[in-house]
Image (spheres, grey):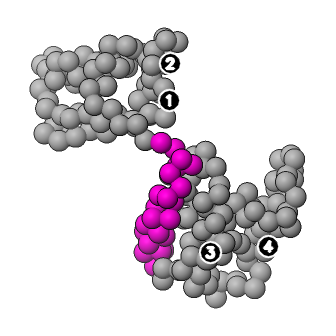
Amino acid sequence: MFEEANGGTIFLDEISEMNVALQAKLLRVLETNEFIKVGESKATRINVRVIAATNRDLKKEMDTGHFRSDLYYRLAVFQIQLPSLKERVKDIVPLANYFLGLFAAKMNKAVPKINADFLNSLQSYSWKGNVRELKNIIERAVILCYNEELTIHDLPIELQNTSSYPAPASPFDWAIMEKLHIQKSTGPHKRK
């Protein structure tokens, strides 16, 4: 990947998940701007900008020995702290609209309008999965939507904020809830 990114930028997502042995190799590449390919004896020089991301506190990971401090300080030249989506409620609507256009185009569908209840549910949800979770929810809604408007019924049950479904207590209850939701979603507007 570093060879492919030579002269450009490489993005290392979830850097905190990298095992310590691989962290040592990455640190060497970052410090020397070169690496040796498997099966070769000559070093390959590179000029790469590195952007790394994580959802963990790397300082805590260093304290527990899960992340090398020397690699942390090599990567932490410029840091951007991005608050969770729950803390950026004003970003939910623009992101939802972006993903809506993206998935409607991907599925060759007209871009549906968004119902106010749908938006209210998005804005009041906790978003533990952050933007990735929102992206998946919108993709699911576009798949399920067969009207010109996304409604609350195009959302997963946990986002519907309705008292018509009791809170499930076990995996069996979740299966029943999923079945009810699918039946409700495919009822009056089945595929043609």
State the separation of the CA atoms marked 3 and 2: 41 Å
Name the amino acid type tagged 4.
Answer: Gln
Q: Nearer the viewer, residue 38 or 75?
A: 75
**Residue 48 placement: quadrant:** top left
Residue at the spot 87% in from the left edge and 58% down from the top edge: 166
Q: Which residue is labeled 2 in the image? A: 60
Q: Are marks 1 and 3 in contact (CB under 8 Å)?
A: no
x, y percent for residue 7? 13, 39
On screen, residue 192 above or below 113: below
The label nearer to you, 4 versus 3, is 3
Residue 71, labelled with which disc? none
x, y percent for residue 159? 70, 60
Q: Are marks 2 and 1 in contact (CB under 8 Å)?
A: yes
Nearer-N-terminus badge (3/2): 2
Residue 85 horizontal side relative to residue 124, left or right: left
Residue 30 horizontal side relative to residue 104, left or right: left
Name the amino acid type tagged 3.
Answer: Ala
Q: Residues within 10 Å of mark 2 (few under 14, many from 20)?
A: few
The N terminus, quarter of image: top left
The label nearer to you, 2 versus 4, is 2
State the separation of the CA atoms marked 2 and 4: 46 Å
x, y percent for residue 64? 52, 12
Q: Is residue 42 visible?
A: yes
x, y percent for residue 135? 51, 58
Nearer-N-terminus badge (2/4): 2
Q: Which residue is labeled 4 in the image? A: 183
State the separation of the CA atoms marked 4 and 3: 23 Å
In what element is the residue under mark 1? loop
In what element is the residue under mark 3? helix
Magenta residues span: 83-109
Q: Are marks 4 and 3 in contact (CB under 8 Å)?
A: no
